[in-house]
Image (cartoon, rainbow, N blue to C red):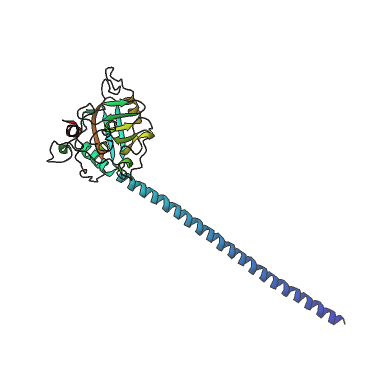
Amino acid sequence: MKKNAIIIIVISIITILIVGIIGFILYKTIIDKIAEINNIEEFGERQEENTNSNKQESNTNSNKIEDNVTNEKNPVATIEIQNYGTIKVELYKDQAPNTVTNFIRLANRGFYNNLTFHRVIKDFMIQGGDPKGDGTGGSTLKDIKDGGDSSEYSIKGEFSKNGYKNNKIKFERGVIAMARADYSVIGLEEEGYNSASSQFFIMHKDNSNLNGLYAGFGKVIDGLEVVDKIADVKISADDINGDRPENPPLIKSITVETYGADYGEPETLKPFDYNEWFMKNYQQ
């Protein structure tokens, strides 16, 4: 009886040991598996983070590249005004391609050198680019092409009222645009749409009334304080229009950095001749 009890005790101890060993092995296996799963999930999270990070970095680099390309496509004009300072203007060729080409052509051939800002209206705009200095002049074919004659020309008005839909520029402070004739007071509205050649203006303040009616083609990126100084010039007391400066600010030069791009010559039109139209319609 005593011997049987000892055997039972020994078997029980062995059974407990075996169960303990098996339990330890199962425990270790489960712990290792959990750790493996955690490592996989953590690795996956790291991979996802790295992928997202790479995507973000890729997008950032892509934006930088696109920005660089955009900057390369947009020429920059430098306007030097004697005793006032320098204005830099980014030109938007995608909005008004022929207008930009015309301005670049005139500027880089020296047309604007020593002309003036002949018309200034504070809180509205400053206007220049007239070789006559009184608002009646413009450029000729010889100003934009070798072998050109002295015939005046004009360019198509790249704005929505004239049927051109690609120009989305709003007339905000600092926007540069082409000046043009306005015959609407005698019922000839469309005749003025395609009359721009060399005269341009820079907005001193926002004016949404001009949206879609004039060809904006760029915006000041440096030198708005110079625009402000010009807008503050003293206006001639004997000027009936109240916009001719007593001492018109002198444009020493306008040059355009094209970053190696060749913009060629602008497409030109024969301008509307008001005198010819008047003689034809009213001469007896």
- Regarding residue 182, the answer to whether it shows in the image is no
Query: Residue 245, position in %: x, y?
Result: 28, 22
What residue is rendered at 72% in x and 75% in y?
Answer: 18
**Residue 94 at x, y percent in the picture:** 31, 45
Which corner quadrant holds the N terminus? Answer: bottom right
- Residue at the extreme front of the image, as rendered: 284
Q: Nearer the viewer, residue 13 or 151?
A: 151
**Residue 120 horizontal side relative to residue 154, left or right:** right
In the picture, residue 110 is in which quadrant? top left
Q: Residue furthest right?
A: 1
Q: Where residue 195 sits: x, y (%)?
A: 24, 36
- 105 to 113, vertically: above or below: below
- The residue furthest top is 237
Q: Position of residue 256 (x, y in %)?
A: 25, 38
Q: How many marks?
A: 0
Residue name at image x 26 percent, y 26 percent: 118
Residue 280, quarter of the rendered image: top left
For residue 118, say whether it is visible: yes
Task: Tell me if residue 180 comes above or below residue 22 in the rendering.
Answer: above
Name the residue located 50 percent from the left edge and 59 percent from the top edge: 47
Which image quarter is the C terminus in?
top left
In the foreground, 184 or 200? 184
Corner quadrant of residue 7: bottom right
Q: Is residue 109 left or right of residue 218?
A: left
